[in-house]
Image (tube, grey):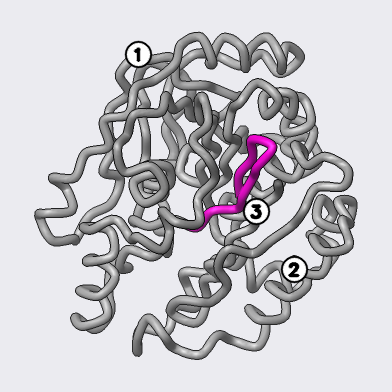
Amino acid sequence: MAATRTSHSDCHGGCDRRVDHGRHAHEPQRRCLTNARPLRRPRHAGERVFRQHLHPQPHVARRRSASPRAILAVSAHWITHGWFATGDRRPRTIHDFYGFPPALYELEYPAPGSPELAVRVQEMAAGLDVGLSSDWGLDHGTWIVLRHMYPDADIPVVQLSIDWDRPPRRHYDTGLALAALRDEGVLVMGSGNLVHNVRAVDFSGIDAPPYHWALEFDRWVEQALVTRDHEALIGYRSLGRLVEMAHPTPDHYYPLLYVLGTQSEGEDLSFLFTGFQYASASMRCVHFS
């Protein structure tokens, strides 16, 4: 999910993240499924996905937007109590996953940070009391996507955390508050999955046919996006059992709401990629421009 007068909903790779970080209390780790291999699965599938991250994909680079002045990323892998923005001039590359070939841990995404953009986020979202963090960096939800989009790592990147204690509408409203960043040349990017249920992973292979409930939720999101039904997307929990299957926890859905809040009237909508991995992860990428 992302935005500059361009915006797209990006999928990402890696595994395992801490629920909390910074001055807030730490909580247990959770597992996640993304397009780097999950913790258990057939070897050949893992090697295939691993190679995708080891070498930037030309087709992704061709489809990216013109280079923005800076990037504000909302990743499903930085969940906090309260909102925080990374304020480092040189954010570190976080390898928040385990069980992968050593070469993946050697990858770095040395993009500069932008303390100025972090302060601008604080100013624009003054009612949220956004704190500055110096103990995070760029987690895999951010750098694995950007490594394909902007492999030169020469665009400043700031990450904004997701406040775990807030309801869906507050996440959407945060996007609204930050929408003007797009007019300032900032790409607003959300990184998650539109369907994300790691407990239902089909370990038979990366191309396992998606479950009927996964397809149903993915198509529901698609239709709501096409008709610009923001209220439905904010109130997605009304779908009941379907949501319980598609998103047992909301962390991979919330990035969409931030990007959705930045959408302007009359913008074009496109889906840069559609498809599933391991039957229970939608990799649909949404682009507003």
Looking at marks 1 and 3 on the same chain, the residue that comes earlier in the sequence is marked by: 1
**Who's the residue at 24% across and 66% down the image?**
50
Q: Does the magenta stretch include residue 211?
A: no
Rendered view: 279 above or below 61: below
Q: Does the magenta stretch include residue 9?
A: yes
Residue 274 pos. (x, y %): 57, 72
Q: Distance between the residues labelled 2 and 3?
A: 12 Å
Rendered view: 142 above or below 245: above
Residue 89 tag number: 1
Quadrant location of residue 88?
A: top left
- State the residue in front, 17 or 125: 125
Are discs 1 and 2 less than 8 Å apart at CB? no
**Who's the residue at 53% across and 15% down the image?**
118
Are discs 2 and 3 less than 8 Å apart at CB? no
Residue 60 tag number: none
**Who's the residue at 81% across and 56% down the image?**
233
Magenta span covers which residues? Answer: 1-11
Rendered view: 106 above or below 212: above
Which residue is label 2 attached to? 222
Q: How many numbered circles does the render carry?
A: 3
Q: Residues within 10 Å of mark 3 (few under 14, many from 20)?
A: many
Residue 237 pos. (x, y %): 79, 60
- State the residue in front, 241 or 154: 154
- Which label sits in the foreground, 2 or 3? 3
Q: As drawn, is 137 to the left or to the right of 46?
A: right
